[in-house]
Image (tube, rainbow, N blue to C red):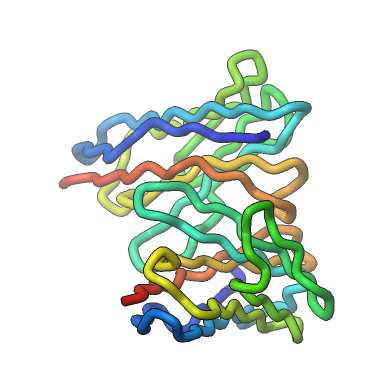
């Protein structure tokens, strides 16, 4: 079956540091890939997505590129802020996020001033 | 963006009792709602998918008689954990989807069964 594996956290960074959260997936065919973010006390929010190979999703300074050859969708940001502290989930779906989502285990990010 | 609420945000109950959790889409009509369960330090596991006015579709391994899901209107779905036991203690999250074809998530409900 489908599965998503994220790097284990927690990740602790200083403000303005570079961020990479690794995500790899196992799925047949061509799933859509997503990153969700969960801020303290709030529900998951869609951060970015990519629906086909070599697509790059981007939002709020975050980027992730759909790499079919390595089955990866790593999340990157060049300069993190304290407000980026949250839990990040990588996920895949057979269709758009309208359909069934398979999530990774989540990575806690804490950014210190 | 669209808002999804859950009530209660946390609940403690005695073993053997039933607990109902509500999921509401506040500013859009949700034709489909999803219920997830999240264990500590683990990913969200889809429990069931419900479409308004029809029976829920449960994922393999999820007991439909224990986790009753009702989606009677376009803005409300409920999850009832029947005869709850300590192993049912978990974080339950709902999401809702409507015409925008994106899932919007509620903040979750922490259930503790004593």
Q: Is any part of residue A98 visible from this angle?
A: yes
The quarter holding residue B54 reads bottom right
Q: How many marks?
A: 0
Q: A50 and B93: which one is in front?
A: B93
Write the residue at 44% across / 67% down. Answer: B88
Q: Quadrant of the C terminus of chain B?
A: bottom left
x and y, in percent, of residue A27 in the image = 68, 29
Residue B85 position, x and y percent, is: 42, 72
Q: Residue at x 42, y 44 (%)?
A: A106
At 39% from the left and 79% from the top, the residue drawn is B15
**Towards the viewer: B73 or A75:** B73
Query: Does A72 sit above or below residue A10?
Result: above
User: Splitting the image into 4 quarters, where does residue B103 fall?
Assistant: bottom right
Does residue A19 appear left or right of residue A48 in this picture? left
Residue A73 in picture, x, y percent from top left: 55, 29
- Report the side of A38 relative to A65 (left or right): left
Please name the residue shown 46% across and 69% down the image. B108
Residue A78 visible to an observer of this rendering? no
Q: Position of residue B41 (x, y in %)?
A: 36, 48
**Residue lying at the far right of the rendered structure:** B54
Q: Nearer the viewer, residue B65 or A30?
A: B65
Q: Residue furthest left?
A: A113
| Quarter of the image with the N terminus of chain B in it | bottom right
Up the image or down, B35 lies above or below A14; here it is below
């Amino acid at each position: 079956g489908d599965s998503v594996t994220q790097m284990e956290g927690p990740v602790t960074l200083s403000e303005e540091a570079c961020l990479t959260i690794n995500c790899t997936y196992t799925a047949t065919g061509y799933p859509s890939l997503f990153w969700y973010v969960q801020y303290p006390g709030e529900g998951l929010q869609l951060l970015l997505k990519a629906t086909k190979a070599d697509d790059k999703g981007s939002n709020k300074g975050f980027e992730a590129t759909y790499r079919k050859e390595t089955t990866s969708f790593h999340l990157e940001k060049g300069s993190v802020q304290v407000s980026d502290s949250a839990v990040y989930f990588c996920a895949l779906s057979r269709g758009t996020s309208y359909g069934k989502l398979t999530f990774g285990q989540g990575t806690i990010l804490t950014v210190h001033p | 963006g669209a808002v999804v609420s859950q009530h209660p945000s946390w609940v403690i109950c005695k073993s053997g009792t039933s607990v109902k959790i509500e999921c509401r889409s506040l500013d859009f009509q949700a034709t489909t709602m999803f219920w997830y369960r999240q264990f500590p330090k683990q990913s969200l596991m889809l429990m069931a998918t419900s479409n308004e006015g029809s029976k829920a579709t449960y994922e393999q391994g999820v007991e439909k008689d224990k986790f009753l899901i009702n989606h009677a209107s376009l803005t409300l779905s409920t999850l009832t954990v029947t005869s709850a036991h300590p192993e049912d203690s978990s974080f339950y999250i709902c999401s809702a989807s409507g015409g925008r074809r994106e899932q919007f998530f509620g903040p979750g409900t922490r259930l503790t069964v004593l």
